[in-house]
Amino acid sequence: NAGVTQTPKFRILKIGQSMTLQCTQDMNHNYMYWYRQDPGMGLKLIYYSVGAGITDKGEVPNGYNVSRSTTEDFPLRLELAAPSQTSVYFCASVIGTGGNTIYFGEGSWLTVV
Amino acid sequence: ILNVEQSPQSLHVQEGDSTNFTCSFPSSNFYALHWYRWETAKSPEALFVMTLNGDEKKKGRISATLNTKEGYSYLYIKGSQPEDSATYLCAFWNSGYALNFGKGTSLLVTP
């Protein structure tokens, strides 16, 4: 069972470069999320989507963009990478609202130098 | 932004000790409370999802309780083992579309 798959696992970017973190889930979940985890901080919501074609900003959206063209895929785009975007990124999905288990990908470690 | 507070921030216990952590959350517009176990380099693993006031859930040596009226949840680990070492995350879901996470409690269990 694949669950939530995100790539790449590790990446080093130079300041000003752009990249896309890929996320795909095979559970036919409606809701998908991108969180970032910084040392000593909880998971902060970057963007979320409640279905194909629908996305919305979370708590820390600046410097990121997302799209949701299919139910399965929810890529996160970093434009003009900055050192402040050095973090661990998690993609997650859930079938519906909060009473259901949310499934996470294994994380993407991004360093911007 | 909904504040979810977890305490303690970190904990170091000996193998065999029992321990507990606290999660505080807003008591209004409650929908669900989640507990996750997260080991570095792995994905957070769901432990419990609780929705009803007074809920008590158990999974092996780990259990959790929920008080939605006063806005807190406790996670208990009985007879801690080194493999229990991880960060335990609490997350709150209200009437919105996403979980709001606390900063986590980092547990270290030494033999």
Image (cartoon, coloured by chain):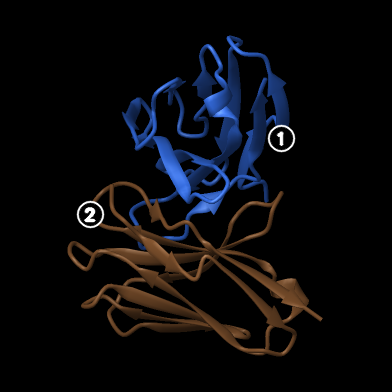
Chain colours: A blue, B brown
Q: Quadrant of residue B39?
A: bottom right
Q: Look at the image and tell me whether residue B111 can be seen.
A: yes
Residue drawn at x 71%, y 23% as measured from the top left: A12
- Indicate which disc residue A9 carries: 1
Q: Is residue A39 left or right of residue B96?
A: right
Question: Neighbour class for label 1 at 10 Å: few (<14), some, many (≥20)?
Answer: some
Q: Is residue A32 visible?
A: no
Label 2 marks a residue whose chain is: B
Q: Position of residue B103 (x, y in %)?
A: 47, 56
Secondary structure category for the residue under label 2: loop
Task: Find residue A110 and report its horizontal and vertical position in percent.
Answer: 65, 30
Nearer to us in this view, A29 or B7: B7
How far across and how far down the image is residue A6, in percent? 63, 36
**Numbered badge on residue B11:** none
Q: Amino acid at mark 1?
A: Lys
Q: How many numbered marks are there?
A: 2
Q: Which mark is residue B95?
A: 2
Q: What separation in Å lies between label 2 and label 1 (alpha carbons)?
A: 32 Å
Q: Kindly give the residue lying farthest to the right in the view shown.
A: B111
Give the crowd class for mark 2: few <14, some 14-19, many >=20 residues within 10 Å.
Answer: few
Tell me the kind of residue under disc 2: Ser
Q: Considering the numbered disc 1 on the image, is that residue within a helix, a strand or a loop?
A: loop
Find residue A11 and report its image quarter.
top right
Judge whether B10 appears above or below A60 on screen.
Answer: below
B75 or A101: nearer the eye?
B75
Q: Position of residue B4 (x, y in %)?
A: 35, 60
